[in-house]
Amino acid sequence: MDDTTSNSLAVALFSEILTNEQLIRSRLSRVLPKGMEISHFSVLNHLARLGDERSPAQLAKAFHVTRGAMTNTLSKLEWAGYIHIRPDWEDARRKMVSISPSGRQARDVAISAITPMVSELIQDLGEDRVRASLPVLRELRSKLER
């Protein structure tokens, strides 16, 4: 493949990914429960799946955002009662974050709101095609994280 073809392919790939991201965020924002932002759902979902506490720094690293951005999101989630933030018993300078029962419930409500939209997309595209695309998307993410 020559440089021109390679560049065109790269531009097309990233153009599609960025456009898809914008469209997905727009659709998600419309179906999430009132007042819940995508960043809130993402953190609640992450904590629910882990089933364990994380420090704000660990969360910031997991989401590839600054500590300040994560602190802002965590403040909003704490204010809503969706998470608990406590001092780290081993290092008082650090804090630990866990999902609260109401946070788990809010996450479940959000999942219920999102599922029909995602299911419809998967049905329209075809389950086999979606399943086949996942390894490529995972590998792309893995290479971008390095």
Image (cartoon, grey):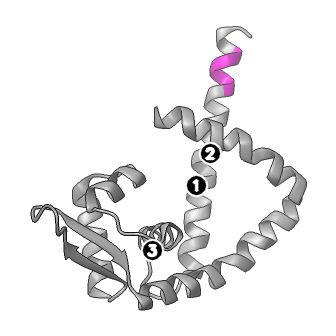
Q: Residue furthest front?
A: 90
Give the number of the disc on residue 44: 3
Q: CA distance from mark 2 to mark 3?
A: 24 Å
Kindly identify which numbered label has been placed on residue 17: 2
Q: Which residue is mark 1?
A: 21
Look at the image and say whether residue 8 sits in the magenta stretch: yes
**Are the residues at dot 1 and dot 3 in contact (C-beta closer than 8 Å)?**
no
Residue 127: % across, % down: 87, 59
Residue 26: x and y in percent read 56, 68
Q: Which residue does the image show at 73% across and 47% down from the upper left?
A: 134
Instruction: Indicate left or right for 20 with 103 as reference.
Output: right
> What residue is drawn where x is 43% and y is 85%?
103
Q: Earlier in the sequence, mark 1 or mark 3?
A: 1
Give the residue drawn at x 57%, y 41%: 141
Q: Is residue 27 magenta?
A: no
Q: Amino acid at mark 2?
A: Ile
Residue type at mark 3 is Leu
**Magenta segment:** 5-9
Q: Are marks 1 and 2 in contact (CB under 8 Å)?
A: yes
Task: Measure the C-alpha gap from mark 1 to mark 3.
Answer: 20 Å
The correct choice, above or below, for 85 with respect to 17 in the image is below
Q: Earlier in the sequence, mark 2 or mark 3?
A: 2
Alpha carbon separation for disc pair 1 and 2: 6 Å
